[in-house]
Amino acid sequence: MKLRFYLAMWMAKLSIVALKLTGHNGTDFPGTVALKICPRFMKYVQKPGKIIGITGTNGKTTITNLVIDMLAADGISVLENNKGSNTLSGIVSSFVYGCNAFGTCKYDTAVLEIDERTSRVLFGDLEPDILLINNLTRDSFMRNAHPEFIAKILTDNMPAKTKLILNGDDLITANVAPTNERVYFGIDVMDTDVQKCVNLINDMQICPHCASVLQYEYLRYHHIGKAYCPNCGFKSPECEYRGHDVNLKKMNIKIDTPEGKNTFRLLNENVFNIYNVVALVAVMTELGYKPKKIAELMKGIEIVASRYDVIEVGKYRIVKQMSKEKNALASSRVFDSISTKPNKKELIFAMNCRGDEKTWTENAAWMYDCDFEFLNDDSINNIVCTGPRRYDYKLRLMLAGFDEKKISLAPTELEAAKYLKLEEPEDVYVLYGTITIDIAEQLIPIVEQEIRERGKN
Amino acid sequence: MKIEVLFPEICNLYGDLGNVRYLKQSLDNAVRLSDGAPIYDVEIIETHLTDKPLFLREKPDLIYMGTMTENGQKLVIKKLSQYKEQLKKCIDEGVNFLVTGNAVEVFGNAIIEDGEEVAQGLGLVDIETRRSSLDRYNCLYVGDFDAGDEEPLKVVGYKSLFGFIYGNDVENNEIETVVGYGSNLETKKEGIRINNFVATQLIGPLLPLNPLLTKWYMNVVFEVGFEPACSEAALEAYQARLDEYMTPGKGWKY
């Protein structure tokens, strides 16, 4: 068996050379090659002494990158998979890159983004010392069905030795693998919290023990908040890592940790990213860092521009914002955030799932779980719906009460710019999905050029 | 007019409550076919797991139930088991039911997962569910719907399931699959109809994706005349989807 492993490693290493010669980089191909030859590759490869896993529906890429950047800022290089995918082949690829030809690991620490479903095929052969689960919410239901299903997969496959860092404000996450050692993170009540859910979906409406209706002390969005069961006493856990006093003017947050308190900078005002900061502080503290040191290391890090970026073009701002297709909750958060911005704005919906188009076509039922109602706001002048799902977006927007006159249809994403009104200084949001990052990269310069050509810069 | 929505706190997956919202928005513009009078009294009554169902006190004009989790199915079966006789009476007496996604499974005889029975159903529909705990069956869907005296309709949507339904009542339906999985891997039939109990595994949601079917359903079931909400945009999306799904060579499963 060991021979098969070495053969897999050598062939995978050779494939890296082939990739370089053909101008390809950072793909899962070496992992795919290795798994083809040795399906239990992860069993035999040497692992670093410390393995940190990061999983959950939303934010795992961002947090993984932040942890890697923080450790790099402290001079620590880690084995990571942020150039490939977060599935088994991507993780195997990262080990092919991170080990020598005899399978000896070059690193002391690994920081791995792990797809939730991949835990099923991975955790038998790789046992994280620490696993962060940021949240479990609805995602692509073709693959992930529903969060309860994913929570069960994680619970059923969780290694006994893994210490969990769990979002205590998310009761689906908080109940994963109940026998494992754990700490929780969360954020105290915020000004924007509500007591009754304003979203279309809330996947934690009943008590998981007695099925009584849960009461919420406060709700942040969907099922994220602090809940209790008036019947059996079940309630949200107390959090060891507790964010409070979020200050969006100063862009900072106070966080109490078992190692002390400190103020940390926020990287972005989006609530998702405020949670990401608290989660980041929890991971770094569990790795042995003190709050003061974490705050220092955070000074030099940013969220990667592929997720969010702003480009100034004269009086206009082009806001490049990821809004995951097939992910109702993530898109709802983006729409909610956009609706709170005071500027006049136009939106380009470029979040078609072009990946699905290659084999079948996108299941658009997620749109009816998503809060398009947030976009029914006077500050939005125009929404350009693009590509194969443009008619679905139009219908869903109209059913949300959005004025048909303010909807434009562009046959393809790259034709969207000419449908912009650009009537006054405003923000132009380019919303794109995980599969359409490349399309967004092509579209942004076209929008920029359109603004300049119409003399609006 | 009263529409009872059963257990929306858990029967709400895959956008299925979009069916209820679409009905409400559409019925706001509806008129009675008999005299053209507006329908002003549309009530959506949400029955939660802790409530006594409306159908125990009176006959709702429609009872709707949508997709839920596998654990949710057990809760629903437990809740409805105590009202099995009343539910049977409702079906026998022709009360309108619309049941979408995996909700039909709770009305069957049993739910079998990985070869083992994980839940006994209500036994009101002669089917059993056979599913795997990890396999997903996803497909695009087009079916021919026999609309009685009206022109046949094409029904579009999706399926996203852990398994399929088998049994005698699988043959009781009016939809013949053109693209996608039928009720199971051995049949082209889709859905179940017993009197006015109508069930389909289709999601989409069914009604906003199928404005023509919605119009037919409301005309026949409620005897009301109306244009479905946002009818032009809905028809545009429907036609685009139908053309797309019927394109020769188009993949349909995932």
Image: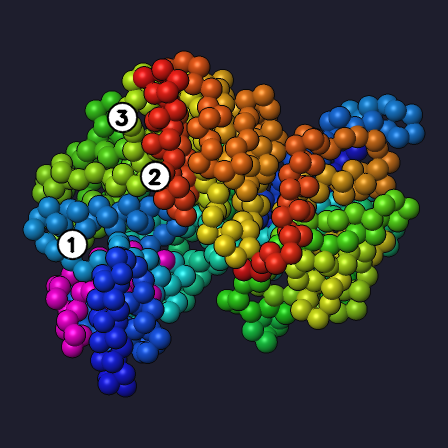
x, y percent for residue B55: 77, 45
For label 3, the SS is loop
Query: What's the distance in space between the residues labelled 1 and 2, CA to CA?
Result: 36 Å
Q: Which residues are magenta?
A: A89-115
> How packed is label 3: few (under 14 Cα within 10 Å), some, or many (20 or more)?
few
Q: Chain of mark 2?
A: A
Residue extending farthest to the left is A75
Find residue A248 and name its label. 3
- Quarter location, residue A155: bottom left
Q: Is mark 1 in CB contact (under 8 Å) with mark 3? A: no
Q: Earlier in the sequence, mark 2 or mark 3?
A: 3
Question: Position of A216 compared to B237: left or right?
Answer: left
Residue A90 in magenta?
Answer: yes
x, y percent for residue A23: 26, 57
Residue A244 in magenta?
Answer: no
Q: Chain of mark 3?
A: A
Amino acid at dot 1: Leu
Q: Chain of mark 1?
A: A
The residue under the point 35% across, 61% down is A87
x, y percent for residue A152: 44, 61
Find residue A287 and name its label. 1
The residue under the point 72% across, 58% down is B178
The residue under the point 18% across, 65% down is A98
- Quarter location, residue A17: bottom left
Name the residue tied to disc 2: A441
Amino acid at dot 3: Leu
Amino acid at dot 2: Glu
Question: Position of A402 compared to B219: left or right?
Answer: left
Question: Position of A307 compared to B139: left or right?
Answer: left
Q: Nearer the viewer, residue A119 or A357?
A: A357
